[in-house]
Amino acid sequence: PDQSDPDPSKKTLVVLGTGWGSVSLLKNLDTENYNVIVISPRNYFLFTPLLPSCTTGTIEHRSIMEPVRNFLRHKKASVKFYEAEATRIDYEKRIVFINDDSEIKGEINSTEVPFDMLVVGVGAENATFGIPGVREHGMFLKEVGDAQQIRKRIMDCCETATFKDQSPEEVKRLLHMVVVGGGPTGVEFAGELQDFFESDLKKWIPEIVDNFHVTLVEALPNVLPMFSKQLIEYTEKTFDEEKITIRTRTMVKNVTDKYIEAQSTGPDGKPKLEKIPYGLLVWATGNALRPVVKDLMGQIPAQKESRRGLAVNEYLVVKGTENIWAVGDCAIANYAPTAQVAAQEGAFLARLFNQMAKTIEIEDELKQCSDAQERAPTKEARDQVFMQIKELQKRLRRVKQIGPFEYSHQGSLAYIGSEKAVADISWLTGNFATGGTLTYFFWRSAYLSMCFSTRNRVLVVVDWIKSKLFGRDVSRE
Ligand code: FAD
Ligand code: NAD
């Protein structure tokens, strides 16, 4: 048979997504044990922690992308990859419906993939809370395409602001860069953007100096709610020095093409609605469910109570099923939706699946041994098989001993601009919080070490050197 044909003696394991969760699973999985099929609309892994740096050209986007074909081809047994989106999962029939959403389509662009085991690692969508105008006018920061669009828009705003005879109000509006959401995505982007202005834009386009302004809007009383109080204060102080305006307790209610409408509390304690004009609007208010996940949850009665994602048990099995697992942002296992969690969950599943395959192997051997014991002609031969069985049973107990998933938190890190970073780190000695330039070097080296491959590491370092030496490129592609 063709080497790529599924082996009928093995179970078919379908993995959805090529993000942090799924890729960590694939990296650690012994693919010889299953017919592995990977389905994702993205044929690469994206190192999201450095994505904010791509919006200003500090790093080129290709430096943080790793083609999945590149690492899948090194796996022991071949893995099939389909560049497609899973549009529906039929839980009862054990089928995934897939659709090729790319520009070039063949005669067939949608089909079905049957599975014995399924891992859902499709991540999340951008939350908009149904606020009108966000999808039409705001820009998200989740995928490579988003970072490219933002980079283009920043330059477009700057060039349009310097267009001949532009009115002062219009110049002010075009150069007002508004970021909604004071979580780490919003904070890191705001920091990167201000850096871009301070170190490059100011020099290259001096006309914009008086009007370029970054504002960060957050509904809660402070930014970075997951960091310690001390680091929140440090971030807010640093932003103040960098001249980034933070508008806390301000909730965006409506978005038009030229301004946002935000509600805050006026000095009289009454709610106040104001219009804030902008040129660039980046929307970073967290995660929402993907439709394919919502649909799956609707098919499983045990998921009825779950709102934010697929409820999983301590082995990451989707509650109410026995052959579907979920990892990362689409799974709710009581951890924050971070890369750190997704990667550990993926690695755990790989261990679990490797052990499951070993269990089946040992159980088969055990069955053969007991048959052999019955057929053994002499007592001596029977005793010999008995010893083998004992040994196998011992091995089986060891293999079956895999404990439930436990997350080990290494800490939180965020870049806040002007070569400063904040870090809440958990080490053996306990937790400690740090911020500043030294932390920035720690942030850089930590992220560098976490990059997917040596190739990525080299490319990122070269980009850092390039942008330091020559400045970031301000051409609008
Ligand atoms: P993702 O990595 O989002 O991957 C989902 C995958 O599923 C993608 O390949 C996608 O193409 C695919 N997919 C989507 N829909 C379908 C479908 N219908 N069918 C099949 N496949 C599908 N976390 C940290 O811990 N540290 C950080 O510094 C950090 N920085 C971040 C910076 C930014 C700008 C962003 C946006 C996030 C950051 N995060 C960080 C969070 C982190 O990226 C996510 O928690 C992580 O990506 C979740 O992993 P995942 O595998 O669940 O999803
Ligand atoms: P988030 O959920 O962490 O933050 C979103 C923020 O938007 C919240 O503080 C919320 O109060 C605010 N918000 C919501 N609606 C609003 C409105 N209408 N007006 C004003 N503010 C509003 O989202 P995120 O920053 O995109 O992060 C998503 C996940 O990815 C998080 O788990 C985060 O930890 C992780 N992440 C981590 C890092 C890092 O560790 N460096 C970087 C980026 C993302």
Image (spheres, rainbow, N blue to C red):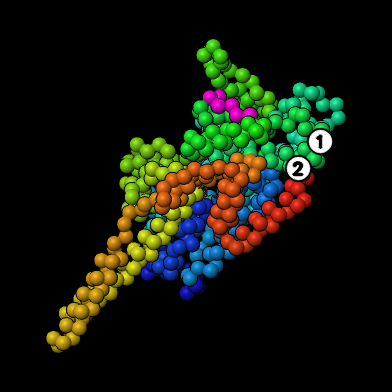
Helix, strand or loop under label 1 = helix
Residue 234: x, y in percent? Answer: 56, 36
Q: Residue at x 69, y 44 (%)?
A: 56
Between 153 and 131, which is closer to the camera in this rendering? 153
Q: Residue at x 58, y 64 (%)?
A: 70
Say which residue label 2 marks.
200
Q: Residue at x 13, y 86 (%)?
A: 379
Image height of 94 relative to 133, above or below: below
Q: Is residue 247 magenta?
A: yes
Q: Which residues are magenta?
A: 245-251
**Of marks 1 and 2, which one's residue comes earlier in the chain?**
2
Classed neighbour count for the residue bearing mark 2: other residues with Cα under 10 Å, few (<14), some (14–19), many (≥20): some
Residue 185: x, y in percent? Answer: 57, 40
Helix, strand or loop under label 2 = helix
Task: Specify the amino acid type for callout 1.
Answer: Pro
- Asked which quadrant contains residue 462, the reply is bottom right
Q: Position of 406 compared to 196: left or right? A: left
- Asked which quadrant contains residue 396, the reply is bottom left
Residue 130 makes an appearance in the image: no
Could you tell me if the residues under marks 1 and 2 are in contact, i.e. CB atoms within 8 Å?
Answer: no
Q: Position of 451 compared to 374: left or right? A: right
Question: How many dots with numbers?
Answer: 2
Q: Label 1 vs label 2: CA separation?
A: 10 Å
Mark 1 vs ligand 1: CB below 8 Å: no
Residue 436 makes an appearance in the image: yes
Q: Is residue 328 magenta?
A: no
Image height of 435 relative to 1, above or below: above
Seen from this angle, which residue lies furthest top?
268
Residue 356: x, y in percent? Answer: 34, 63
Residue 206's label in the rendered image is 1
Between 370 and 223, which is closer to the camera in this rendering? 223
Between 415 and 54, which is closer to the camera in this rendering? 415
